[in-house]
Image: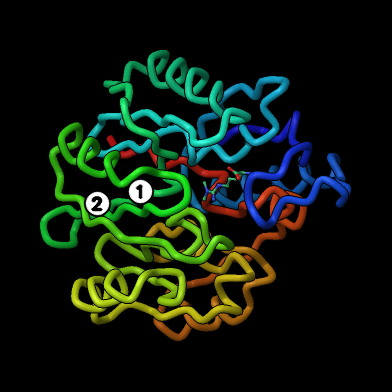
Amino acid sequence: MCPPEYFTVEYAINPWMDTATPVDPELAVKQWHQLRETLLDLGHTVHEITPEPGLPDMVYAANGAFVVDGTSYGARFRHRQRAAEATAHRAFYDAYGWRFVAPAETNEGEGDFTYLPDAYGGLILAGYGFRTSSTAHAEAQEVLGRPVVSLRLVDPRFYHLDTALAPLDDQNVAYFPGAFSVASQRVLAQLFPDAILADETDAFAFGLNLVSDGRHVILNSEATGMAAKVAAAGYTPVQVELSELKKGGGSVKCCVAELRP
Ligand SMILES: CN(C)C(=N)NCCC[C@H](N)C(=O)O
């Protein structure tokens, strides 16, 4: 995770960002700490990457890389405003001694990649259409040695895969079909017949931008419908307020990069 020390909305690179809407920096820091405490209370270890001035979106740590089986496939950001974040993330992984592979293709880390270790022997799902190039999917497959399923995102509000789809455990997902092309919807229905289907209201409340440990599902407090759906499926929803970070176009998942040894 990356503390939101320099978080602000000073440019707009997604439909959620509006430079005219003020951010409450103190509230952003408070909400971020509540998310961190929630993870710690659930028994997770949290490492912090040092925020850098001039990189207000660095709080969305999940965009900095995608780690599977101890290998970190680095990010290469679509927009110049975020480009320097990739270097900071690389330094973080180097300092921890992780194997790091620098990408040649544009990709935004866990924003557009996710991994299900028990689905089909270990499956990567990858989004494209707004940020990550589809060519990065093939690159990730070569780097990580796991099959990658490419999914096309079609709604600009759901510009990263992790705004439209989330693993609930090691083999099942929740997703909002309307965020995907018709063909990608068919692929998801084939791969995940037991998925929880979110609707537009759930997705709009960032209800899919969640972090799950397979039992507890941490999600945005505004996503009440999604909380009810995961509870009905036997998971325990844990709701956190992240109103300020939503102004930058992200929520729970965006703030948490998962390290998979
Ligand atoms: C799920 N993740 C990681 C995200 N969706 N990230 C949010 C990025 C927000 C940033 N202002 C941007 O537009 O890049």
Q: Position of residue 95 (x, y in %)?
A: 42, 13
* SS at mark 1 in the image: strand
Q: Position of residue 155 (x, y in %)?
A: 51, 66
State left or right for residue 12 relative to residue 22: left
Crowding near the residue tagged with mark 2, few <14, some 14–19, many ≥20 C-alpha atoms within 10 Å: many
Q: Position of residue 152 (x, y in %)?
A: 35, 61
Who's the residue at 22% across and 35% down the image?
Answer: 139
Quadrant occupied by the N terminus: top right
Q: Amino acid at mark 1?
A: Phe
Q: Are marks 2 and 1 in contact (CB under 8 Å)?
A: yes
As drawn, 69 above or below 217 = above
* SS at mark 2 in the image: strand
Crowding near the residue tagged with mark 1, few <14, some 14–19, many ≥20 C-alpha atoms within 10 Å: many
Residue 194 is marked as none
Distance between the Cα atoms at labels 2 and 1? 7 Å
Residue 124 is marked as 2
Q: Amino acid at mark 2?
A: Ile
Ligand 1 within 8 Å, label 2 CB: no
As drawn, 214 above or below 138 = below
Who's the residue at 32% across and 77% down the image?
Answer: 195
State left or right for residue 74 relative to residue 193: right
Quadrant occupied by the C terminus: top left
